[in-house]
């Protein structure tokens, strides 16, 4: 269970990214965060694994409060939160398999991790994950030589290698063609169910949110203005989520 | 239409100005310094002729071949060792100096300043300072090359490291990996090809420079060239030059080939 309450983030320049945000997310589900550009979707996602530091509120993962964790403890909690990115962020000269293995660096000793001394079990696990994302045959291929959709699936396998409870995805399909988009979204949904994960996805396509999400959060001008299942996402609700900021504030 | 005419007019003016500048650059030195380019060209030709006549290796020079190859070998070993060790030190400095991998902004600035200072001290100065400190031996030559190389490689490595996208490093940070794990498994594999390429390029350059450094520090191939030259054994000195040219071409070809392989 991930529970966020009263989360507030102000950027150093005074810009308010999040204002009193609260919601909770259940394991085994896909949550889509939708909202106009600049609403605060990225800010919210990056606050959840503390790439950003909100100044107030709570982020409760299991029984661990995350917002105020000191760096060392933060590293341990971060291992439980995987992240995938719009531009994949793989080490392109390395093989797909090596990229997936990066997912377990956080639980290895400093030296073994630095030198890349992975155990047989870790290698086997990475290979299994690559098979699970449909890239078993590409394990030894350079990540840089894969297609966008394949790179994103390597990114997903890397996140899965952390054995996470949560996977955060910031616009994971924004650089992909429709076929790859479908593959990646289906994969994320299946993984959420099979591994009892909380998958949280920033999206700008409402139809994809409707199709794949169990839970939709609508963000507008730093506030949560919609928090319900896809069935409740009426045209009226959509208009509210995508309203120009002033309207939403009075809505 | 008026705009178009204006555009072409401006272009014509620019061309005319460029031509005038070129003409001026050609005429000014002749006028100020009494350098005659035609004369200079002829002079260079005469120089080559003189070289060809006096420096052509002969039977006697071939007797020195053993010693020449021995000194050349020593010089190459010293150049490779100095460059490689400088490479390791420069990499550590660059990690502390590059925006992407540095953890302390103050150290970042310090490294950049250091690299820039080292780069701007001419190697003649290094060789002379070291000569007075350590006298004539191989170590002096080694140290001179090492110090010359550090500044260049640090700067090149900093720039290479800064080309790693911030997001790639972030992707590893969020797995819970620690700094040195991210460096070892993420950053270095991402940049190893360009880093090696810089190192090879520097080795190539340093083998050439080692000859000059050797003349000053009295070591290796530079030293025996100096020796032959000053004792008027021009054919032997010519053989030294030929040997150096052969080796640098061979090294350049090898290093180009290696860099092509690395780039794949
Ligand atoms: N580093 C930053 N400094 C200042 N303001 C920022 C920064 N990052 C984002 N913002 C602002 O915060 C708001 C939310 O941005 P973001 O979370 O990126 O929106 P979204 O992902 O929904 O498009 C925007 O108004 C944006 O301009
Ligand atoms: Mg965004």
Image (cartoon, helix red, strand yellow):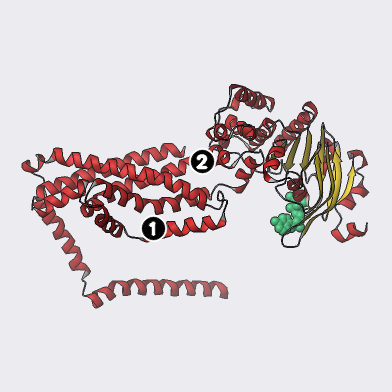
Residue at coordinates 81% horizontally, 41% vertically from top-left? A60
Across and down, in percent, residue B51 comes to 13, 54
- Asked whether A83 or A178 is in front, the reply is A83
Mark with earlier residue (2, 1): 1
Q: What is the number of the mark on residue B259?
A: none
Give me the residue at 93% from left, 41% from top. Answer: A232
Determine which of the numbered discs, if any, sits on residue B188 in the image. Answer: 2
Classify the position of the N terminus of chain B by image quarter. bottom right
Question: Is residue A75 or residue B170 the one in the foreground?
Answer: A75
Q: Quick check: B152 left or right of A47?
A: left
Label 1 crowding class (10 Å Cα cut-off): few <14, some 14-19, many 20+?
Answer: some
Q: Which residue is mark 1?
A: B119
Residue at the left extreme, as displayed: B60
| Vertical comparison of A125 with A79: above or below | above
Mark 2 falls on what kind of element? helix
Chain on which label 2 sits: B
Mark 2 Cβ and ligand 1 under 8 Å apart: no
Which residue of the protein is positioned furthest toward the front in this rendering? B133
Residue B159 vertical position relative to residue B168 in the rendered view, above or below: below
**Residue A105 image point, x, y percent:** 61, 34
Toward which corner of the image does residue B26 lie, by quadrant?
bottom left
Work out whether residue A34 can be spotted.
Answer: no
Q: Is residue B253 visible?
A: yes
In which of the image's four quarters is ligand 1 placed?
bottom right
Q: CA distance from mark 2 to mark 1?
A: 24 Å
What's the residue at 68%, 34% (across, down)? A159
Q: Is mark 1 within 8 Å of ligand 1?
A: no
Residue found farthest to the bottom = B32
């Amino acid at each position: 269970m991930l529970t966020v309450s009263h989360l507030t983030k102000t950027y150093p320049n005074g810009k308010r990214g999040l204002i009193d945000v609260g919601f909770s997310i259940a394991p085994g589900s896909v949550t889509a965060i939708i909202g106009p550009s600049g609403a605060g979707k990225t800010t919210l996602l990056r606050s959840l694994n503390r790439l950003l530091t909100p100044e107030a509120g709570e982020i409760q993962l299991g029984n661990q409060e995350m917002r105020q964790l000191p760096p060392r403890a933060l590293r341990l909690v971060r291992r439980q939160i995987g992240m995938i990115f719009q531009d994949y962020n793989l080490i392109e000269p390395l093989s797909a398999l090596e990229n997936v293995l990066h997912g377990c660096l956080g639980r290895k000793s400093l030296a073994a991790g630095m030198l890349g001394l992975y155990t047989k079990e870790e290698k086997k696990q990475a290979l299994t994950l690559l098979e699970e994302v449909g890239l078993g045959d590409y394990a030894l291929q350079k990540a840089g030589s894969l297609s966008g959709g394949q790179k994103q699936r390597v990114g997903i396998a890397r996140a899965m290698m952390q054995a996470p409870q949560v996977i955060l995805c910031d616009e994971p399909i924004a650089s992909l063609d429709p076929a790859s988009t479908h593959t990646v979204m289906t994969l994320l949904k299946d993984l959420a169910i099979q591994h009892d994960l909380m998958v949280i996805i920033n999206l700008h396509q409402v139809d994809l949110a409707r199709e794949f999400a169990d839970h939709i959060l609508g963000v507008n001008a730093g506030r949560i203005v919609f928090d319900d299942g896809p069935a409740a996402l009426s045209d009226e609700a959509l208009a509210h989520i995508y309203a120009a900021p002033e309207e939403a504030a009075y809505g | 239409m008026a705009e178009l005419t204006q555009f072409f007019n401006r272009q014509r003016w620019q061309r005319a100005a460029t031509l005038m500048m070129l003409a001026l650059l050609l005429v000014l030195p002749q006028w100020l310094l009494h350098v005659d380019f035609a004369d200079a060209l002829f002079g260079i030709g005469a120089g080559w002729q003189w070289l060809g006549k006096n420096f052509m290796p002969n039977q006697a020079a071939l007797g020195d071949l053993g010693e020449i190859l021995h000194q050349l070998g020593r010089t190459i070993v010293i150049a490779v060792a100095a460059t490689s060790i400088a490479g390791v030190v420069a990499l550590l400095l660059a990690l502390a100096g590059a925006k992407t991998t540095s953890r302390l902004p103050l150290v970042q600035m310090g490294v950049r300043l250091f690299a820039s200072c080292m780069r701007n001290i001419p190697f003649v100065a290094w060789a002379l300072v070291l000569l007075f400190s350590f006298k004539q031996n191989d170590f002096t030559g080694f140290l001179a090359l090492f110090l010359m190389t550090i500044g260049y490689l640090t700067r090149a490595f900093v720039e290479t490291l800064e080309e790693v996208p911030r997001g790639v490093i972030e992707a590893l940070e969020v797995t819970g990996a620690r700094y040195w794990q991210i460096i070892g498994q993420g950053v270095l594999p991402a940049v190893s090809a360009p880093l090696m390429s810089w190192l090879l390029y520097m080795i190539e350059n340093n083998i050439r420079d080692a000859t000059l450094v050797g003349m000053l520090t009295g070591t290796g191939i530079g030293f025996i060239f100096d020796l032959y030259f000053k004792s008027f054994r021009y054919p032997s000195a010519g053989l030294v030059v030929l040997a150096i040219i052969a080796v640098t071409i061979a090294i350049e070809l090898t290093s180009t080939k290696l860099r092509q392989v690395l780039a794949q």
